[in-house]
Image (cartoon, rainbow, N blue to C red):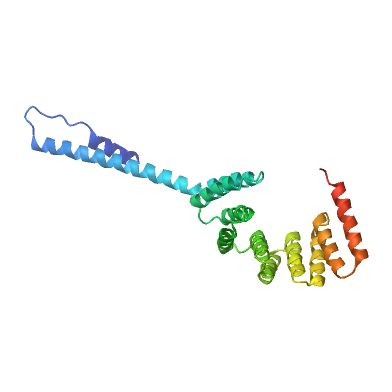
Amino acid sequence: MASILTRWLQAIAPVPVPETPDPAVLAQKRKQKRLIAWTAAIILVLASAGYTYSYVASAPDRARAEVALGIRQMGPGAYDQAIAHFDRAIAIWPEFADAYLNRAVAEHSISQRPAALADLDKSLDLNPNLIRAYNERGQIYLENADPQHAIQEFDKSLQVKPSLEGYYQRGLAYEYLGQHQKAIADFDAAISEFREAPYTYRARAAAKRKLDDREGAADDERVAEQIESASPR
């Protein structure tokens, strides 16, 4: 390295120009100018490449930061602002499945169902293990009066990982179809996943009433009230 630097410094060392210009001296001066220009260009290219690499490498972190800001906006219901953050996250890192998922949730919240379904499809193309994406897609199908497709989505969610929401939402789909026993089985499973969700007991109570199990329905309503009264307001 020292040898290369020494040669470079020697190559660009000022060449004295005699009063009567010598063609060889002038040629050396022109050679030095070209060498300096090429050196400056190489330095600029290397600096630009380093900056570009650093910028590209930081894309996942910058995209995650945008998603975090978007999720924060969804809390108070600022869905348009949230979507803008998710848009930026996707522009930064187009392969970020969570950005599409969260944008879909925001779009669903403002009844933009076709856009939400498109984003859910994309999120699952990128990551087929997003249980929330299956549950969200199932909810949209159920809202669109398509319980059979909804059940298929909840099945996929539960195949990835059993969850309270997966069982609860599938139970609602079975209720929609009038299949109360299947609904109750799913509400049972939802309660076994998490016993402190009052809405699962109320849903099971409604299904039991349709099967004339008034005592069981009353028990579930009582448990739901106890959970709600024990919860901090």
Q: At x 30% / y 39%, what residue is drawn?
A: 40
Residue 68, above or below 220: above
Q: Looking at this rendering, what residue extends furthest in the right direction?
A: 215
**In which quadrant will I find the C terminus?**
top right
Q: Which of 190 and 9 is in front in this view?
A: 190
Q: Looking at this rendering, what residue extends furthest in the left direction?
A: 20
Where is residue 136 drawn, in percent x and y? 65, 60
Q: At x 41% / y 44%, what residue is drawn?
A: 50
- Residue 139 appears anywhere in the view: yes
- Residue 162 appears anywhere in the view: no
In this rendering, position of residue 119 left or right of residue 203 = left
Q: At x 73% / y 67%, what residue is drawn?
A: 173
Where is residue 128 drawn, in percent x and y? 61, 64
Q: Quadrant of residue 107?
A: bottom right
Residue 163, above or below 227: below
Residue 195, above or below 233: below
Where is residue 148 drawn, in percent x and y? 68, 72
In this rendering, position of residue 19 left or right of residue 139 = left
Q: Looking at this rendering, what residue extends furthest in the top direction?
A: 19
**In which quadrant will I find the N terminus?**
top left
Q: Which of 116 and 31 is in front in this view?
A: 116
